[in-house]
Amino acid sequence: MRRGMFFLLLALASCRPCATPQISPPSDYAEGGYIDSCMKDEPEGSLVDWWKQFDDPLLTCFIEKGLECNQDLRIARERICEARAIWGIEFSRLLPHIDAFALFSRMRNSQTLSDADFSGGTFINFFQAGFDTLWEIDLFGKNLSRARAAAYDIAGAAEEVRNVHVSVASEIAIHYFRILAIQERIGVTKNHIAVEQELVDLVTERFEAGLIPELDVFTAKALLQERRAILPEQEGRLYKTIYALGVLLGTNPENMISYFCEPRPLPCRKGKIPLGLPSELLCRRGDVRAAEFTMLASGARVMAARKEIFPTISLDAFFSYATGFATQWFKGPSREWNLLPSIFLPIFHGGKILSNIRAETSIQRQSVLAYEKSVLEALREVESALVGYFQEGARIDALQKEVDANRSGRKMANTLYFGGKENFLFVLETERDLYVSESFLVESKEFLMTELVAIYKALGGGWECCD
């Protein structure tokens, strides 16, 4: 009776459920209503290949090449092969292991081991060939749980590929827009250099005519050199960003320079944002799904660890032909076989099995917490990207008005200065204000496109839910 109760307790311990996540996504996004009102006139369409909506063939070419040649993506794909191989190792534990062998030995007996005269043959031959089979009968499902965990690892590796796929496409788009933004900043700087060079020439002529003090000439030249000092730093950033894009594409970074010999316009506010429901993130985002499969795999390993306390039943079978004469090999009288069923029940292992159960249980709880965190991070990234996108759009409107006002102010300041109604410091301030506002406008456009790409990345990069 006591033995029965003992095994019943073991069975109940092994069937105890693992920890489960205690989290559920909200019913809607904080910015959902605002997006619905902004996007109500947008046409429906699949945005799995979201980068094609920008109508930029070069961007499309870069992303398609990156999805084929990016090193991180290729490494992630190789991890699927590794996971499949590990699953094959774990699944093999469920099947019998059969080994074939063949051997031959020739031995000479010593004639001086005793006082008696040597009798018998001086040499002994031994011929043997056969099969040896070992099968651990998985009666309690320990090996099956290990194989199930390895299968979940395959699914997790596949989802990690999907996550890297989205990340690579997003990073390529971000670097591409950053390059266009830097080129536009360089264009703004060069335009101001040209304008300020003309201003230096005009101020110099007025000084030589005795109309203004030499201080105005020095101030104008200082402003010109200030702009020229900015240009090398911007060009350095441009090349560094181009080289980084080359690494993302898996190609020689120097080969990318030829693609950006001529500046390209930076798109602004061009994109559709079909949100769906927050719960759909759980089937769209690769990182969330990978965390889910990691949680399931750790749960299967907990079950395997718990089943270590059950008996292990094995069947060992041996069959061979053994003889001392080659002419009798593979004949009926030379046959030998052995059948050895065995059962092993762990009694005392110094707490190893229980410690392993506690370790796997802790790992499983960590994976549950990691899954909950991935869900919260997914929601945070979506909400942050949405807020950033729409707030940056409002900032662009204000900056555009500021740029228009500063351009009008610079024109008026030049008119008043050359009419003798204002001093040169007034012209200098308006010129600097215009440069700063134009630079902020380009920066805001870059942020806007970056946030738009961040939305697609946060939403999973595609809108096809998996089973």
Image (cartoon, grey):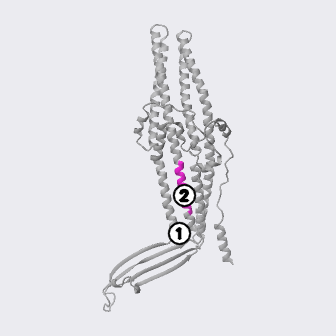
Marks 1 and 2, how far apart in space?
18 Å
**Residue 409, quarter of picture:** top right
- Extreme residue toward the bottom, this view: 116
Residue 216 x/y as whole percent: 49, 14
- Tag 2 or tag 1, which sits nearer the N-term? 1
Residue 86 x/y as whole percent: 50, 61
Q: Residue 355, can we see it?
A: no
Q: How many marks?
A: 2
- Which disc number belongs to residue 94? 1
- Which disc number belongs to residue 153? 2
Magenta segment, which residues? 148-163
Decide whether residue 446 is among the magenta residues: no
Mark 2, Cα crowd under 10 Å, few <14 / some 14-19 / many 20+, is many
The reply, left or right, for residue 316 in relation to residue 282 is left
Residue drawn where x is 68% and y is 39% of the image? 33
Residue drawn where x is 44% and y is 41% of the image? 246
Query: Vertical placement of 141 versus 56: above or below?
Result: below
Residue 159 x/y as whole percent: 55, 52
Q: Secondary structure at mark 2?
A: helix
Residue 384 x/y as whole percent: 62, 40
Question: Which image quarter is the C terminus in?
Answer: bottom right
